Amino acid sequence: MSQVRQILDMNAFDASLGGEGPVARRLDNLGAASVLFYRQPIEMVAAKGAWMEARDGTRYLDFYNNVPSVGHSHPAVVAAVSAQIATLNTNTRYLVGIVDDYLEALKAKLHIELSNVVMTCSGSEANDLALRVARAVSGKHGIIVTETAYHGNTALVTEASPSALKRSPLPDHVVTVPAPGSAAYGEDIAHGFHASVVAAMETLEARGHGTAAFLADSIFSSDGIFADPAGFLLPAVQAVQEAGGLYIADEVQPGFGRTGDAFWGYERHGIAPDIVTMGKPMGNGFPMAGMAARPEHLAAFCEDVGYFNTFGGNPVAAAAGLAVLRVIDEEGLQDNALRVGAHLKAGLSEIAAGSERVTDVRGAGLFLGVDLGAADGSGAPDAGYTVQVIDRMRAAGVLIGAAGRYGATLKVRPPLCLNMAEADRFIEAFAGAVKG
């Protein structure tokens, strides 16, 4: 039987082995909290577009992370940040025009009822605040998440991030549901997922907590990427809302045009979320995040506690965020994600059709999941083989990571500026890796 994997253990360097040079230096500085990619970590020195460059001069095509969403070192973001930090950087207790310019530009992309935005520095902070707001509004305490969810690293959010927990059991107020795939729900994913969420609400009610929030990354990235069929998420969300709970759409991963057919992941499902959280791609590498909420919900929370974040919403972050929104629009990156993503998915699906070890390809736009299975053709998840494929792709100059309950899903999420030639480079490397 396949072993459940924690998210930070996937494709990670084993710090217990020690190291030399830069690796030893990092371990001395961060100790047990050190998390490095690959069993042989890479020292990076530069990056541009969809490419990264290592100390030894090797160039890698980056399909690993979605932080540099519009491309590494994008000149428009660099210029905006440089100009603003050379002029003024302070907190939101002062009126600074670019901060409200950014908030208004961001709100223009959101559901119309989400007209209040609170800026933070990380997605973890945004999700922490969102859960606190949901509890204040609902008067309930319970949280529903998927089985392999990851939503951040504060104390509250870690409790609702099963994939981050190594030994501790989930607290009594957190109930999980299986990821929305055919393995758990067969062909009728919408009905099955709805039934699981309703059952989770009943469990929380029986435990005396009630349901404050259903918190879900709307492409279920840590669970292994589950995007389709579009609309399947709506019945479950409506059930939670009708019971007085809030739906928190975690858009840290699928937001900002990544799915191609929508700017936000929740839009693909026709959902009107109560809260939207966002982070990584907002500043193209500059640390910024946020929570968008309905005014009455935020007011209910602020009656009791209030919220202020020293660095959240600073003018430099606003400059970075505004530049990202402009680049997405001016360079047509959402449409690019749709077109290049479709090409990429078709190429990977063709490989899957001829390989017993590539068991599924799914996703939307430039966020795809590729399942890898055992050599016996059973389709059972094979984490060991997945690591081999990841290492072979690195040797071919392509960076890629893993996800899913068993660490047997390749998480494909390159920068939105990826071009067709670069997509073909990835397809070629993947074809070689699964044949090797």
Image (cartoon, helix red, strand yellow):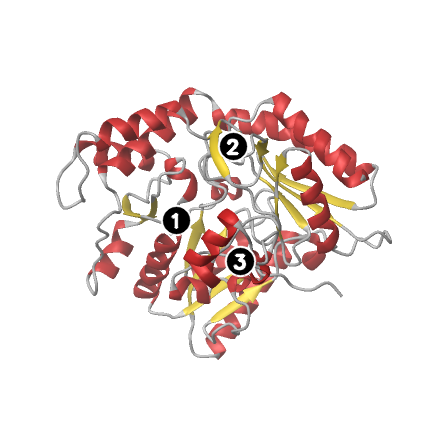
Query: How crowded is the residue under tag 1: few (<14 C-alpha within 10 Å), some, or many (20+)?
Result: many
- How many numbered circles does the render carry? 3
Please tell me which residue lies in front, 421 or 177: 421
Q: CA distance from mark 2 to mark 3?
A: 23 Å
Residue annotated with mark 1: 277
Q: CA distance from mark 3 to mark 1?
A: 15 Å
- Measured Cα–Cα span from mark 1 to mark 2: 20 Å
What's the residue type where badge 3 is placed? Ala
Which of discs 2 and 3 lies nearer the camera? The answer is: 2
Q: Quarter of the image holding residue 4?
A: bottom right
In the rendered image, residue 338, in percent from the top left (x then y), is placed at 57, 28
Residue 17 in picture, x, y percent from top left: 59, 60
Asked whether disc 3 touches disc 1, contact meaning CB atoms under 8 Å apart, the reply is no
Mark number displayed over residue 415: 2
Residue picked out by circle 3: 149
Left or right: residue 172 compared with residue 88? right
State the residue at coordinates (47%, 76%). Answer: 172
- Pointer 1 or 2: first along the chain: 1
